Image: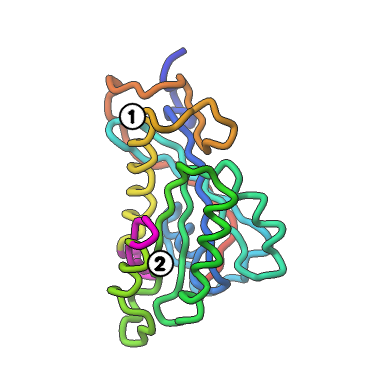
Amino acid sequence: MAAATAGPYNYSYIFKYIIIGDMGVGKSCLLHQFTEKKFMSDCPHTIGVEFGTRIIEVSGQKIKLQIWDTAGQERFRAVTRSYYRGAAGALMVYDITRRSTYNHLNSWLSDARNLTNPNTVIFLIGNKSDLNESRDVTYEEAKQFADENGLLFIETSAKTGECVEDAFIETAKKIYQTILDGSLDLNAVDSGIQSRNNRPDLRKPAGQEEGAKTSGCICR
């Protein structure tokens, strides 16, 4: 079977992502900025989960990201926890201007660690870097938290788009590396990865990026 086919199915892998964090930290705005390259300034809070996709390229491989944006309200936690299973990547978001959202990271991280597989790549994101004058959480303390817990870390702005691409794509690069080094079993039900040919095809030529679909968003 070929690594990819023409048209909208021109990709070698599907990676499942989840976006988690408190209500109002900008999870859906990050999703919308990444998939549509737009900022939605006024949209309702996510109820349950929303979904978006985009095809990116990593090391010459086209990869389709299936991104599940989960509601941050406690009353939806029982529903959203079911989406953690089989996630290859988890983007854990807090608001740099609201310390309470940072203080809740241990709870979100506990869920991510308990409900995903051991190889799930967890990326800590401090959103709303455009509001630096209202900062309530320093870069240094968040970076220390990430280092202590073995997480990737970046600050982003869903409004300006700053570093949003990096967060999603660096997660994919880390996941792809686990495929290359053989530490991830692609046949495992909870791997969060679907392969069109069950192995990395390093000979596959580079192609264009793009392709998006999204639904719903949660903003400030």
Which quadrant holds residue 215?
Answer: bottom right
Name the amino acid type tagged 2: Ala
Question: Which is in the foreground here, disc 1 or disc 2?
Answer: 1
Q: Tell me the residue that label 2 is attached to.
A: 158
Start-end of magenta stretch: 148-162
Secondary structure state at the residue bearing disc 1: helix
User: Which residue is located at x 35 percent, y 62 percent?
Assistant: 148
Q: Residue furthest bottom?
A: 134
User: Which residue is located at x 29 percent, y 23 percent?
Assistant: 202
Q: Residues within 10 Å of mark 2 (few under 14, many from 20)?
A: many
**Between disc 1 and disc 2, whose residue precedes?**
2
User: Which residue is located at x 39 percent, y 59 percent?
Assistant: 149
- Residue 180 numbered tag: 1
Give the answer, above or below, for where 170 lies relative to 202: below
In x, y percent, where is residue 24? 54, 74
Give the answer, above or below, for where 89 lies relative to 78: above
In x, y percent, where is residue 213? 52, 47
Q: Which secondary structure class fits the magenta region best?
A: loop
Q: Residue furthest front?
A: 148
Which quadrant holds residue 48?
Answer: bottom right
Name the amino acid type tagged 1: Leu
122 horizontally vs 107: left or right: left
In x, y percent, where is residue 120? 47, 45
Q: Viewer-proximal residue, 208 or 45?
A: 45
Does the stretch in magenta take in 112?
no
Does the stretch in magenta take in 154?
yes
Give the answer, above or below, for where 25 lies relative to 206: below
- Disc 1/disc 2 C-alpha distance (Å): 31 Å
In x, y percent, where is residue 51? 58, 51
